[in-house]
Image (cartoon, coloured by chain):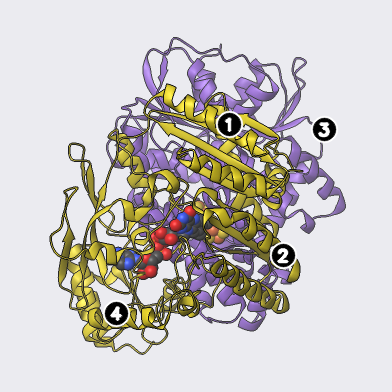
Chain colours: A yellow, B purple
Amino acid sequence: MTLSPNLILEFKTLLGENNVLTEETDRLAYAYDAAVLKPVTPALVVMPTSEETLGRTIKLAYDNGLPITVRGSGTNLSGAVIPEPGDGLVILTNRLNKILEINQEDLYAVVEPGVLTANFANAVAATGLFYPPDPGSQAVSTLGGNVALNAGGLRGLKYGVTKDYLMGVEFFDYNGELVKTGSRTVKCVTGYNIGGLMISSEGTLGVFSKLIFKLVPPPKASQAMMAVYDTVQGASETVAAIIAAHILPCTLEFLDQKCIRVVEANSKIGLPTEAAAILLIEVDGSHQAGVDEDAAKVKSLCTKCGANDIRVAQNADEKNKIWEARRNALPSLARARPTTVLEDATVPRSKIPQMVSELNRIAEKYKLEMGTFGHAGDGNLHPTILCDKRDEEEYRRVEEAVDEIFDVALKLQGTLSGEHGIGIAKAKWMEKETNKATIEFSKNLRRALDPKYLFNAGKKIV
Amino acid sequence: MSNEYSPSSLTELAKMLMQLDDLLVSCMRCGFCQSVCPVYGATFREADVTRGKIALLEDLAHELTADAENVNERLNRCLLCGSCETNCPSGVNIMDIYLRARAIVAGYKGLGTIKKLVFRFILPKPGLFNFLVKISSVFQKPFLKRANQKVGTSTAAVLNPFLGRRHIPSLPGKTFASANGSVMEPGRGGPMVALFPGCVPDKVFPGLAEASLKILRHHGAGIFCPTDELVCCGIPVLASGDVAAFDELTKRNLEALKKRPFDYLVTPCATCASNIKENWHRFKDRFSAEHQSLIEKIHSQTMDLTAFLVKVLKVDFQPSQNEGKIVTYHDPCHLKKSLGVSAEPRAILKSLPGLSFKEMPMADSCCGFGGSFSLFHYDLSKQIGQSKRDNIVKVSPEVVATSCPACMMQLMDIMSQNNDQVEVKHVAELYADTLN
Ligand SMILES: Cc1cc2nc3c(=O)[nH]c(=O)nc-3n(C[C@H](O)[C@H](O)[C@H](O)COP(=O)(O)OP(=O)(O)OC[C@H]3O[C@@H](n4cnc5c(N)ncnc54)[C@H](O)[C@@H]3O)c2cc1C
Ligand code: SF4
Ligand code: SF4
């Protein structure tokens, strides 16, 4: 650590001795996030406990030229909070965790950025309202992290993702000045849509201090089912057919054979291990009759597209069983081998069969164990490679396979990342998906908002 | 201490920790443990949660840090409550990692003299231990001040250096062991039960040990309880990384238990139950072939008293009128998270006349005791305990019940510190009161 003792003292005076972590042991615990990447130990870690001290922290850090990485819960999968080398400063938001307002009349809520997604969703539910974005990490992820990565979840198809709920943001710019954008109203055309810019900004443009989210009334009825297929093609055609029939299930999830088998081996819930794929489908709405009608239509579409078995949940218990298969997908895969590389390449829905067969080809080519599950309704698949990062030769094959997955996704007119973000992991691919002009434009934007290039410099656009 | 756990240099320490590498590497850094860790919930510091601790152990193993002292300190900021392991999507064997790592690091650093004296000299000798408790209970009288009549706690200024500002249960005049001696009863046709009273019920809450005995007798079980030979189950020494003392205590217990055949080993202490069932088994390779086969048997025979009543004796606990004093229940981590027992104690409580059961919010969140954790990190322990207490009083109970005497000590302290008029009781005590 090369930071001057005076500067450290200034942080301590500002934030309190306990909220400035200088010991190596404490700093080592912020060298990583959930991405399988090389850790970088920060020079200093600070925990502001109020909006005011957050702003002053940023100013102090910026004036002194410290590279700044804002960290929520550190669960992102792209290295977005791995500190910058050198005098890297990590600013933790987890003490800024107050829900400031849940407005039941005007259907919005105001929160600090360190509030955990699930805590927020539960508090909203307790008032009889609904905050739909539900990333798999919701029990730990922060809303600030969700906005900065535009987190999605199982309900994306019908209810959208984080960006569809963000009504306003207050954030600190590099001078530690508070910028306010958006409002508590459904409509707002005051100024630029800076909030939109903050979505998936990955800590590169400013530091959020307050977020305003839209809330919706919850669905009153739902119906879940599982459809079993001999071919991935059949599952994918079902997805297309359901959407063509103008039904929007709240959830439409896909598990391939490998996933089905590991889940069944682990939790013995009676999954069809010979099937090529299963779809887990839930329709919801405000009336049971309408939901039943949609469910019947979905069921007949499944059959038409080749489902050889359809299990409709008859009660809450059976519904829970159906979702257990999805919930257990990642845990079961993760248990199989020491290292789990969770990818996120996304393709247009109609390209899912091609994508899945390409994924299988890639797994075979590089002799890797891979299971694929994901949000079929969004074309957002999570090919998951099981390996041991200590085996250098094997891990090299993993890296090559990941590169090829991106290549294939782009060829199928897809995108590098549906929801996990670019971070360090995928930065080198950005130009390939877009073009030089896009990168230059983005860099110019960054330079204007961060002249010293101190906000998470090595992430996203490099 | 056996040298398999006593590295003599940092490089050797690193090498030994590398033996844990296969366990450590399965952590995928998802961070999900943050949502359940009581210590992290109080401090928000990553080094206090498993993801951070595993990263630190890896750094020490790969010689990326030389600060064994501080890594050890962070490692010990943990209640060994097992919440993280139960919730880990990657199935990391976290308790295995912690217990082995503590042994290795303690082997490197050495134990403090006081710990050494207690672990190696006092705990293995039931007679001496009892004698010391007796002396303390005599001497405590002039030094104790009644803190809370209802809860039954005192403060002991003279003990502050050891106990912090903890409100402690008033020590009884006689331990369970000295009152009953060794017990051997054939029973009335019920299964033969080895009753393991546990140190805390024996010495601090003998009424609880008596209640367990009364219950087993009432249901006609055979009872084998060699109090003059049984010693501490070993969890405090294991948690401190003293594997040599753990070996010694376990051997003594096994020698005492092998003297009679029994069908079940039953204890009213959730912590003893999980330690005997899980940790004796976890470290079974350290013992002789004879002891190993006994450990195997005990592994499948060990039960917490409440589960034993419901599952083995099949006592028919019919729901009562649910009228009377409000009682709520705290799930001990070592019962719910380690052994998966949570329905049985509730079934018992709901059946008791004169009590009305009310579930508190977050009944299974840790009370913050964690054995010696509460001594070395009393303020943190108290902070975690305070959230437990705040949840307890939400249902305005007159009694808070639990199934672990260690939790009882913590609950008594926090209720007493808050001046709450709430009795702390073990489920077995409440049940025994209804039997004639
Ligand atoms: C097992 C697992 C499952 C997952 N499932 C999903 C899923 O279903 N859907 C999904 O979208 N993601 C998922 N993720 C990824 C991750 O959890 C999400 O991206 C989440 O939004 C990250 O939140 P966080 O609080 O951990 O943010 P962090 O990882 O701490 O940070 C993420 C980004 O947000 C920035 N940031 C944080 N706070 C602020 C702030 N106040 N101001 C400005 N920038 C800020 C950081 O700089 C960083 O760039 C999963 C991850 C894991 C490990
Ligand atoms: S939950 Fe398990 S895998 Fe995830 S970070 Fe914690 S220990 Fe590691
Ligand atoms: S055992 Fe309990 S206290 Fe220790 S790290 Fe796990 S959850 Fe936290």
Query: Could you tell me which secondary element the residue under label 3 belongs to?
Result: loop
Query: Could you tell me which secondary element the residue under label 1 belongs to?
Result: helix
Q: Which mark is residue A299?
A: 1
Q: Badge 3, how many Cα within 10 Å: few under 14, some, many 20+? A: few
Query: Could you tell me which secondary element the residue under label 2 belongs to?
Result: helix
Query: Could you tell me which secondary element the residue under label 4 belongs to?
Result: helix
> Marks 3/1: CA distance?
60 Å
Q: Nearer the viewer, mark 4 or mark 3?
A: 4
Query: What is the quadrant of the C terminus of chain A in the image?
Result: bottom left
Q: Which mark is residue A446?
A: 4
Q: Residue at x 48, y 69 (%)?
A: A78
The relative height of residue B236 versus residue B113 in the rendered view (above or below) is above
Q: Amino acid at mark 1?
A: Lys
On whether disc 1 and disc 4 are found on a single subunit, the reply is: yes
Horizontally, is B76 left or right of A368 in the view?
A: left
The relative height of residue B379 versus residue A460 in the rendered view (above or below) is above
The relative height of residue B163 versus residue B406 in the rendered view (above or below) is below
Q: Residue furthest left?
A: A190
> Marks 1/4: CA distance?
49 Å
Of mark 1 and mark 2, the one earlier in the sequence is: 1
Q: Which residue is mark 3?
A: B261
Residue A23 x/y as whole percent: 40, 77
> Marks 2/4: CA distance?
39 Å
Horizontally, is B240 left or right of A263 in the view?
A: left
Q: Looking at mark 1, is its residue's CB closer than 8 Å to ligand 1? A: no
Pinpoint the chain carrying mark 2: A
Can residue B70 be seen here? The reply is yes
